Amino acid sequence: MKKNPLHIIKADRKAERFVLPQVIRNGDAYTKLSILIMGAANLCRGQIVKGLIFLAIEISFIYYMIVTGITSLVNMTTLGTQTQGWVYDETLGIDVLTQGDNSMLLLLFGVVSIVVIILFILAWRANLKSALEVQSLKEQGKKVPGFIDDIKAYFDSKLNRTLLTLPMIGILAFTVLPLIYMILVAFTNYDNAHQPPGNLFTWIGLENFKTILGSGGTISKTFWPILGWTITWAVFATGLNYIGGILLALLINQKGIKCKALWRTIFVMSIAIPAFVSLLVIRTMLQPEGAVNVLLKQLGLISKSIPFLTSATGAKITVILVNLWIGIPYTMLITSGILMNIPADLYEAARVDGASVRKMFTKITMPYVFFVTTPYLITQFIGNINNFNVIYLLTKGEPSTLAYYQAGKTDLLVTWLYKLTVNSKDYCYASAIGIIVFIISAVFSLIAYRRTSSYNNEEEFQ
Amino acid sequence: MHKKVLSLILVISMIVTTIAGCGGKGETKTTAGTTKGKAGYASDAKIKLWGSQEDQEMLKNMIANFKEDHPEAKNWTIDMSVISASDAKTEVLKDPSVAADVFEFASDQIAELQAAGALYRITKNKDQVIKNSVENSIESATINGELYGYPSTANSFFMYYDKSKFTEEEVKSLDSILAKDLENGVTNFSMDIDNGWYLSSFFFGAGCTLFGKDGMDPTQCDFNNDKGVLVGDYILDLAANPKVKNHDGALLLAAFKDGKLGATFSGTWDAKAIKESLGDNFGVTTVPTITLEDGTVVSPSTIANFNLYGVNAQTKYAAESMLLAEYLSNEKCQKMRFEVRNSSPTNVNLLKNKELLNTSPAVAVLSEQVKTSTNQPSISQITNFWQPMEAFGQDCIAKAVTKENMKEKLDSMVKSVLSKLGEQ
Amino acid sequence: MKKQKSMSKNKKIKNILSYVILIILSIIWLLPVFWVIMTSFRAETGSYTPYFFPKGFTLNNYLKLLTETHQFYFAKWFGNTLFVAVCSCIISTFFVLSVSYVMSRMRFKLRKPLMNVAMILGMFPAFMSMIAVYYILKGIGITQSLIALIMVYSGGAGLMFFIAKGFFDTLSRALDEAAYLDGATKFQVFTKITLPLSKPIIVYTVLTSFLTPWVDFVFASVIMGDNYNNYTVALGLFKMLEREFINDYYTQFAAGCVLISIPIAALFISMQKYYVEGISGGAVKG
């Protein structure tokens, strides 16, 4: 790595976060001018292209703020005041529409403006840092890098910035921005009764969370049981997949078993086929008159259809079992390699001590595999909490129950909130539930990750 | 070098303008056309029309006829895209500014579309439209005395039966259907028991109401009154009867195909498949009567909804769109719909034309059935109705409901139907 | 001697038992696959039959699916999906590899914070924000186009770097150091040294991102709206299961399922080895 030439900044590490005070304290006239006119220092010291880029950013930003930015921010505070209206036109014999405000778009534009402002502040900071950098170089009498040198640096010491730029833009536009919007919706009353463009919605603070988490309300009576089932499901789906996968891997990897690759391929079929297809097909097969019941009846094994998906308990067990169908091979693939890596002398020693097969499994195999795969388990657990596909495609959350609002016995929080957005358009409640789901997963996984060795000793693996 | 700088600034300013465009007003002011021709219609109107994929051919012909019958529309551009009546609400509300100017939608969506301000109020030719359409279709298109849609087709369910298994006399009453002993493995009667669309007909028939008499009051539902409890008991018996099966669409078709089913409730969409399966034994009739425990004979009142043509409130060509929407729902087009798509008309003249209707027995029965139907409420509270009804049906099948706790279960069902999400 | 014999006998029993279990499990695993293939050749229409094996077999379901354009444009949608899948998997792979390389090999101030943020972002249910995504695409002016779908599927790909990063972490750094001594830039090391060694993880990333467009129906339906021509197969297949179509189209649905599964499954099984290496190198070390 090349040495960072920012002596001034290095000298003042504590204040590194705040570039502005440094500029005021240490900057010369050109550098200070950069506070107001971005890129001034670069321009005056020969970094023409860089300076012009900064200047262009500033001009575009000011242009954007004047054209829409400021109005967007102001509108965001109210989310619109003018309701859409109609005026009857006698001569035409029809109504004429007078446009009103669209709260949803105002909110979205507001979010865009905020993101633009944040990006601008980052650019502005970079501009000041760059100003300090050239100043320091000049003072030491070193050569100021030209544009070509800068480009070169972006493929070497600053490669991280180059490689991260495009992915970050994508994440910003398609993940972060929509997410901020969604989070903000949770604090409005954007529900069924406040649909744009005919109606306005507005900020209501934490009301939605109170309604959902409070006791006795229609929605909270649904929320708590569904949360319970979501967690039960995630525990079983993850745990059984995990154990099943390891057992299957052990079974196939036994010494006496021939055609290991063939067996593996058979089980991998369930990963290779898109889940969308297999789940919809299995859904049809498991109906009371579906292929599985028909087959079992033809074989004379049962006389009455098994209610795979129609009774509450049956459906709950079925979704977990079908999830095994998809999940076990996955774990099998991952653990196969690990199992083969377990030092053989560990088993040898145990055998000498007269340990049974079961004991070796619980005392050697499981702890070893568990140790290596904890991060995978955590990801799986979070993935199962948010497992939209398996539930929605397999049961649609059914069977329904009188006890829940707009949800069925096998609905997870995610499928429920999908129903809330698609069926009843209660966006604000759905968003609030989304945030709650997120908090649960985030808290869980941050705690869990911090405990894993791979997080703490990241460097050791390399 | 300077050229590079210049092009850079150009690119950045382009990006900025795009972002600014994204943050801009987004909407354009509505003006009723630019160049006004005869009768206030623009001569170069541009209208987008939505219809389902299977209707596209037919709509093309209708538009050709439209341009012929209305010379002022000769130079209009009418674009068609595929959105079916059942998806209209979702797509219109997603982004009304790019939605079609004229679209077909199911009447159960009207209250939400109107509440979101997405529908144009119909004022022009209103009396004519009302006069031409059968009364309950107009009801379904009316909110607070104002008309918001042009009725086009009617939709409800009725009974299909196998003539080799039941006589015309027997299918008049569900009790006589169930009394008969058919050969082994044959189900006398099947219906989608865990589906409010079918189940509600028994309650409506007994005089219960959903959301008040006009279906507009989200605080009213009396499915749990004394009559309702009797109906509930009847449904429970039905679900427990070994001669009855809980079949949804795909299953009943399979059952008819194997000759394993006597009679079932369904709509016109299954007519073709069932006719193929039953051949000469294909029978259709109105929904049979049921006899409650206290001896009262009830004629179920099936839920009905209508496909309506609506005009997008955001349209730039309001008058022109209305002309088109009205045309697409007129007698001529409804006749074409009947012939091409086997749709049941709402036009009074067509409904009087028995000779025409009898060419499709299913539609003839449907138009008969609709006379005693209950309009499907369209207020947004209706989204709360299906799920509790489904749950009630499933609980009846699972025997989680008994005659002892019937009142209690119906109470909780009604409470569920009437619940508001934000309530504490 | 006797003991040895009983041991080998035990072993034999154990082996037989293992085979029996494996065979039973295989039947369970292959049953849905077998059934859907069989249904796709079934001559009788409808989604349910009261018997397990079809009474007649036909190729018509496939022919109709691919040639009839009266109701569903399956062939066109298949092409759309393939195009979207190829483009978005190229972009996604590029994004994922870039981010994971940076996170694995470079050290900079924002590294840990960015990794934490990425983990957090991955935990929000994605479809919650679909309306906002729609309006962002509209702002850029590309709704209802295949480009829009490509951007949606690959835009957030940069967040999925954890597994690939884990893989890069396991690659030895000695080569890198040697290259630096020879005066190579970091970019050269990335493209000339690291990437050629990363075949498994590239295959893994390509596979996972290739799959998304085939199975997503939530975003596709929001973005395509009334543009029937630009639908993808998942949307079309989902539509076939609607009440009006299910009876006539179920066997064609099955044929469609088989058709989209074949390329994916073939690709997957042939690349299995790399996939396993990629994931077990990456997933377990997070």
Image (tube, coloured by chain):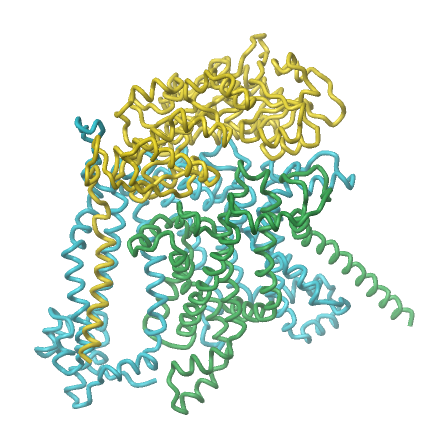
Chain colours: A cyan, B yellow, C green
Quadrant in which the N terminus of chain A is drawn: bottom left
Judging depth in this view, the residue of B34 and C48 nearest the camera is B34
Q: Residue sitting at 10 percent across and 74 percent down?
A: A32
Judging depth in this view, the residue of B223 and C261 nearest the camera is C261
Vertical comparison of C124 with B248: above or below: below
Judging depth in this view, the residue of C103 and A227 nearest the camera is C103
The percent coordinates of residue B179 (x first, y second) are 69, 15
Vertical comparison of C125 with A335: above or below: above
The percent coordinates of residue A134 (x first, y second) are 18, 82
| Image quadrant where residue C48 sits | top right
Judging depth in this view, the residue of B258 and C271 nearest the camera is B258
> Furthest-top residue in view?
B295
| Image quadrant where residue B98 sits | top left
Vertical comparison of B211 with A77: above or below: above
The percent coordinates of residue A194 (x first, y second) are 29, 36
> Furthest-right residue in view?
C2
Image check: A127 left or right of A445? left
> Furthest-left residue in view?
A29
| Image quadrant where residue B60 sits | top left
The percent coordinates of residue B95 (x first, y second) are 32, 43
The reply to whether residue A139 is in sight is: yes
Figure disc tally: 0
The reply to whether residue B203 is in sight is: no
Q: Residue sitting at 54 percent across and 17 percent down?
A: B231
Image check: B343 left or right of A178? right
Vertical comparison of C69 with C22: above or below: above
Q: Residue sitting at 27 percent across and 43 percent down?
A: A205
